[in-house]
Image (tube, grey):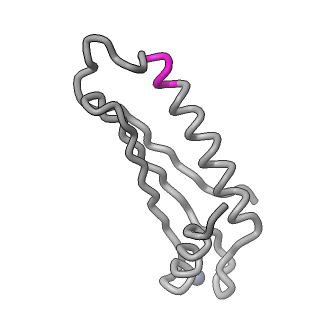
Amino acid sequence: MSLDIQFDLRVEGEALADPFLDRYELELMFEGARQSIGAGLRRKFDGIVCEEHTEAPRFTISGVYDNAIEEMDIQYHVDTCCQRFLLRVMQILNRRA
Ligand SMILES: [Zn+2]
């Protein structure tokens, strides 16, 4: 069973006159983020399901690249079948690589 991971990556704000990353480079960065975050989550959550409901966690990764400060802010949203499994998922998520 493959992990359910949705990505919502976007750009905010006006591009600077001479942006550090152009549109194409931004897409490359987004694609890189999708691949590395996806791979990291699949590695951490391989075979991990709720003991009670046998459901896997679902992830939504939101990333906003702010043109004004040229930085990317990434947030993880986790959906689980129950609160107890959510706690376990958060522990695994916060574990280092
Ligand atoms: Zn559960």
- Residue at (59, 34) in percent of width and height: 32
How far from the left and from the top, in percent, is residue 93?
57, 67
Type of secondary structure dominating the magenta stretch? helix
- Residue at (50, 44) in percent of width and height: 7
Q: Residue furthest top?
A: 17
Q: Is residue 6 magenta?
A: no
Identify the image quadrant of residue 89: bottom right
Instruction: Give the image quadrant in which the ligand numbered 1 is located.
Output: bottom right
Q: Is residue 15 left or right of residue 51?
A: left
Depth order, front residue of 26/84? 26
- Residue at (39, 40) in percent of width and height: 72
How many marks overall? 0
How far from the left and from the top, in percent, is residue 31?
57, 32
Q: Which residues are magenta?
A: 23-27
Depth order, front residue of 1/25? 25
| Residue 51 versus residue 66 in the image, above or below | below
| Residue 30 versus residue 14 in the image, above or below | below
- Residue at (26, 18) in percent of width and height: 16
| Residue 37 versus residue 14 in the image, above or below | below
How far from the left and from the top, in percent, is residue 38?
63, 48
For the N terminus, the quadrant is bottom right
How far from the left and from the top, in percent, is residue 95?
61, 70
For the C terminus, the quadrant is bottom right
